[in-house]
Amino acid sequence: MDSAEPFIYTIEFGFLPFCLSPPVNVTISAVKANSAVVTWDIPEGDPVIGFAITQQKKDVRMLRFIQEVNTTTRSCVLWDLEEETDYIVHVQSISMSGSSPLSEPLRFRTPKEAETQASKSKAVETEQCRETNSNTMYRNKEKCLMNTTH
């Protein structure tokens, strides 16, 4: 009997999996003693279906992980923050094939609760001065100037 050698065919498919880019233009706004808003952009063309955010207190190993899918949202409110605390935030894009690398770290500090209230009060007084008509503005000019310059 002749021994036939089996034929082995090896077919290699060379491809690189699609790789998401990390979010860009990551910013923090509306920073208050207990909350802040993180916003970001995604590079055009990335098939993003959601996001993941890691939030960490500076010099603390524990972190909060927020993930949301099936959304086109490009912002998230960070809640339950502690006043006068330093935080580090990263954002990742999520696609059907996985997650992007982390964005560059973004550092911010929450203010003291009293500073948040004082800032809010000053903004309301300033707006009230702007909304008054010219007669009232003239009579209250001194008061408005006092409130907006301090």
Image (tube, rainbow, N blue to C red):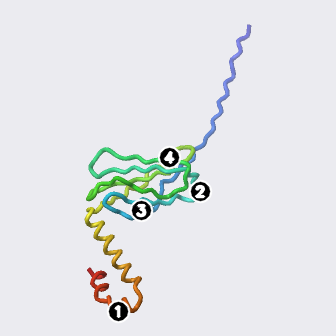
Residue 138: numbered disc = 1
Q: Which class describes the residues within 10 Å of circle 2: few (<14), some (14-19), or many (20+)? A: few
State the CA–CA distance, disc 3 to disc 2: 21 Å
Residue under circle 3? 27
Foreground mark, 4 or 3, reads 3
Name the one closer to the observer, 20 or 33. 33
- Left or right: 130 with respect to 117? right
- Measuring from the top left, give residue 58's x and y in whole percent: 29, 52
- Measuring from the top left, give residue 143's x and y in whole percent: 29, 85
Foreground mark, 2 or 1, reads 1
- Measuring from the top left, give residue 92's x and y in whole percent: 46, 51
* Residue at screen point 52% across, 58% down: 42
State the CA–CA distance, disc 4 to disc 3: 20 Å
Residue 99: numbered disc = 4
Residue under circle 2? 45
Foreground mark, 1 or 3, reads 1
Q: Amino acid at mark 3?
A: Thr
